[in-house]
Image: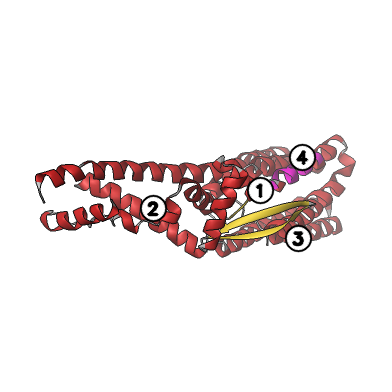
């Protein structure tokens, strides 16, 4: 399917008298961010410099297990940084967006905007 | 490209752009739901506390007529310290002092401060310094509490502590001097250290 979209874009480009560049094909999308929970984690951390696990859970209305799995994937990709500590006697895990994570989110937003403007312009 | 191929791919752009719009909406809504300003500087608050303690010492050493002037200078110093250290912390976190959550915080913080300024102007001719300073503590507490709703959870607690100090000062005017030291010096210092330790400088 992704190949098909790419092929369509390549074929269509020479015939279109438009100055707007075609949006990058879907295959170029950062699949890691495309998932809703992971996109939510990055968006929340872009708005707030640091959020705890429980704060993220509240904002995203996610379960412990779900959030944990997705946060780990983003951490492994270097998009978020995680620090563990204690608040009194309660363990606390804080997440921050890394430079790479912010860049990836910005690219993702730019990609979405390009798709929208291409369709509107076309 | 054949006609059949063209028809097969036709729904794709519509599908993609709807998804794209939905994703952008999701990102914006998530950011709005999150938006708290977490870059208030613990170190900045601690230094404001130290400067307020110094102002209290100076105001006690001077003639009573200069007391308000000393606190006006302290207000300017505290504003500069707060803004400087908060901007520094925000910059190190890759954000600015003028993002959406900071603006919301400022919007909630400002009205009680403006009311405090107005009451100071109105009450100044009466010469009732204890009443003016009790109002400062109370309304600053309200400002910190309402503004703190858009920041980390410890800030509204500091606001409540200031309101309590203001209530004591207003109900027992003899304690006003000590409440000024305890509030602007002690509470800023204490909560500044707590914020510094928990949320960074």
- Say which label, 4 or 1, has the lower sequence index: 1
Mark 1 falls within which chain? B
Place of residue B87 in the rendered image (x, y in percent of width and height, measured from the top left): 58, 60
Of A5 and B41, the residue lying toward us = A5
Res A116 seen here: yes
Q: Are marks 4 and 3 in contact (CB under 8 Å)?
A: no
| Residue B36 visible, this orientation | no
| Foreground of the two, B16 or B116 | B16
Q: Are marks 4 and 3 on the same chain?
A: yes
Residue sitting at x 58%, y 58%: A96
Left or right of residue B194, residue B89 in this image: left
Q: How is the image coloured?
A: secondary structure
The structure residue drawn at horizontal position 13% and vertical position 53%, both measured from the top left corner, is A16
Query: Marks 4 and 1: same chain?
Result: yes
Segment tinted magenta in the rendering: B155-164
Numbered mark located on residue B152 in the image:
1
Q: Main secondary structure of the magenta part?
A: helix
Q: Secondary structure at mark 1?
A: loop
Quote the CA–CA distance across marks 4 and 1: 18 Å
Residue hosting label 2:
A109
- The chain ID associated with circle 3 is B
Secondary structure of residue under mark 4 = helix
Where residue A66 sits: x, y (%)? Answer: 57, 46
How busy is the neighbourhood of tag 3: few (under 14 within 10 Å), some, or many (20 plus)?
many
**Residue nearest the viewer, comparing A118 with A7:** A7
Q: Nearer the viewer, mark 3 or mark 1?
A: 1
Q: Are marks 3 and 1 in contact (CB under 8 Å)?
A: no
Based on the picture, tell me whether residue B158 belongs to the magenta stretch: yes
Disc 1/disc 2 C-alpha distance (Å): 27 Å
- Nearer to me, A85 or B158: A85
């Amino acid at each position: 399917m992704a190949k098909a979209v790419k092929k369509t874009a390549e074929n269509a480009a020479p015939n279109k008298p438009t100055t707007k560049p075609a949006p990058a094909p879907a295959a170029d999308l950062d699949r890691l961010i495309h998932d809703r929970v992971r996109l939510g984690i990055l968006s929340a951390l872009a708005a707030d410099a640091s959020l705890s696990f429980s704060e993220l859970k509240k904002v995203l209305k996610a379960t412990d297990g779900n959030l944990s799995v997705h946060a780990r994937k983003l951490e492994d990709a270097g998009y978020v940084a995680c620090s563990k500590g204690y608040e009194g006697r309660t363990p606390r895990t804080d997440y921050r967006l890394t430079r790479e994570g912010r860049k990836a989110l910005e690219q993702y937003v730019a990609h979405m905007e390009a798709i929208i403007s291409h369709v509107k312009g076309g | 490209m054949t006609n059949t191929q063209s028809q097969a791919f036709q729904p794709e752009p519509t599908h993609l752009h709807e998804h794209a719009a939905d994703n952008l909406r999701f990102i914006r809504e998530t950011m709005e739901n999150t938006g708290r300003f977490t870059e208030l500087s613990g170190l900045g608050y601690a230094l404001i506390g130290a400067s307020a303690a110094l102002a209290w010492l100076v105001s006690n050493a001077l003639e009573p007529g200069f007391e308000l002037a000393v606190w006006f200078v302290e207000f300017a110093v505290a504003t500069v310290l707060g803004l400087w250290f908060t901007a520094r912390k925000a910059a190190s976190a890759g954000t600015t002092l003028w993002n959406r959550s900071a603006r919301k915080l400022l919007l909630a913080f400002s009205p009680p401060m403006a009311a405090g300024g107005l009451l100071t102007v109105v009450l100044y001719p009466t010469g009732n310094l204890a009443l003016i300073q009790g109002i400062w503590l109370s309304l600053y507490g309200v400002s910190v509490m309402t503004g703190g709703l858009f920041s980390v959870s410890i800030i509204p607690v500091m606001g409540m502590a200031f309101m309590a100090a203001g209530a004591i000062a207003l109900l027992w005017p003899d304690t006003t001097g000590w409440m000024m030291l305890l509030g602007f010096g002690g509470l800023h210092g204490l909560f500044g250290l707590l914020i510094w330790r928990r949320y960074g400088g």
